[in-house]
Image: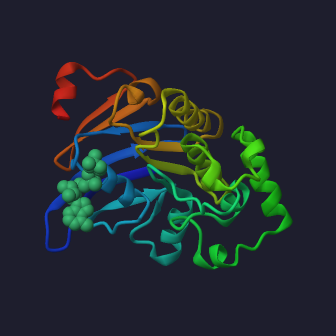
């Protein structure tokens, strides 16, 4: 469970880009984040994944104080909160499987990525995860030959292999055709439902948020202006996010 209180982010020597954001997220939640360009959506996800330092606020993960908890508490959150980019980086010349085993810059320690060492149980765990994502026939294909949707799903497998309990995804279906987008969001939804993963995804375009998320957070000018459960946004609420 995540408990965010008063998250504020000020760019050093610059503007305040997130102001006093508070919300809780529970196992199995699929939360969409909406807001116009520059409203702070990406910054919110980066702060949750500890890719950006917080200016103030408190962050509890499974009851533990992350910001007050020292290096090991922060490393644990970096491993368990995976940041999924709009176009996740996979090494183009390595296979999907090898990319999954090696891990991502944001989640996996550097020594592990440099050595690329593979134990037998790493191999089995990664293959299992890839198979569950329906990508078994792509496991030995170089990443450069995977489609956008397959890359996104391979990146989800990679996050899970390296211990993700929370996936924060920044526009994960932007640029994908509707069929591939449904596959990616269906995958994320199933992870919430079946495995209790928390997904927090920026889904500003179209009606993906309404179709897949249980809850929609709306940002405007770095402030949380909407927190809506289990229903579509009204026209008035949509205007609040313009
Ligand atoms: N390193 C930085 N230095 C200065 N300003 C920054 C920095 N990073 C982000 N910002 C500003 O913070 C605000 C929020 O940025 P963010 O990327 O979170 O917006 P967003 O809602 O994700 O926008 P978009 O939908 O266009 O991606 C923007 O005004 C942006 O210019």
Residue at 72% in and 52% down: 141
Name the one closer to the observer, 134 or 236.
134
Q: Horizontally, is 87 left or right of 204 in the view?
A: right
Q: Is residue 201 visible?
A: yes
Residue at 58% in and 59% down: 90
Which image quadrant shows ligand 1? bottom left
Name the one closer to the observer, 215 or 83.
83
Residue at 52% in and 44% down: 198
Residue at 33% in and 33% down: 205
Extreme residue toward the right, this view: 120
User: Is the residue 171 above or below the residue 76 in the image?
Assistant: above
Q: Quadrant of the C terminus?
A: top left
| Among the 4 quarters of the image, the one containing residue 121 | bottom right
User: What x and y, as percent, mark residue 74?
Assistant: 48, 70
Q: Horizontally, is 72 left or right of 4 in the view?
A: right
User: What x and y, as percent, mark residue 195?
Assistant: 64, 40
| Among the 4 quarters of the image, the one containing residue 213 | top left
User: What x and y, as percent, mark residue 238?
Assistant: 22, 27
Extreme residue toward the front, this view: 145
Q: Is residue 55 visible?
A: no
- Look at the image and name its color scheme: rainbow
């Amino acid at each position: 469970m995540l408990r965010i209180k008063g998250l504020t982010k000020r760019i050093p020597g610059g503007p305040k880009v997130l102001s006093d954001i508070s919300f809780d997220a529970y196992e199995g939640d699929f939360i969409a984040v909406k807001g116009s360009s520059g409203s702070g959506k990406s910054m919110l996800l980066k702060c949750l994944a500890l890719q950006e330092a917080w200016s103030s606020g408190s962050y509890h993960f499974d009851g533990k104080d992350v910001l007050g908890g020292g290096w090991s508490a922060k490393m644990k959150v970096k491993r368990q909160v995976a940041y999924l980019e709009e176009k996740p980086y996979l090494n183009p010349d390595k296979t999907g499987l090898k990319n999954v085993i090696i891990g991502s810059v944001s989640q996996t320690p550097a020594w592990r990525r440099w050595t690329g060492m593979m134990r037998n149980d790493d191999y089995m765990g990664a293959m299992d995860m890839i198979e569950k994502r329906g990508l078994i026939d792509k496991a030995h294909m170089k990443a450069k030959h995977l489609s956008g949707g397959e890359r996104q799903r391979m990146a989800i497998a990679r996050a899970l292999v390296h211990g993700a309990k929370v996936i924060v995804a920044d526009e994960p279906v932007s640029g994908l055709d509707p069929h591939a987008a449904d596959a990616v969001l269906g995958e994320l939804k199933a992870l919430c439902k079946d495995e209790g993963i928390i997904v927090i995804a920026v889904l500003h375009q179209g009606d993906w948020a309404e179709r897949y998320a249980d809850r929609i957070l709306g940002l405007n000018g770095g402030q949380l202006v909407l927190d809506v459960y289990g229903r579509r946004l009204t026209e008035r609420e949509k205007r609040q996010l313009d």
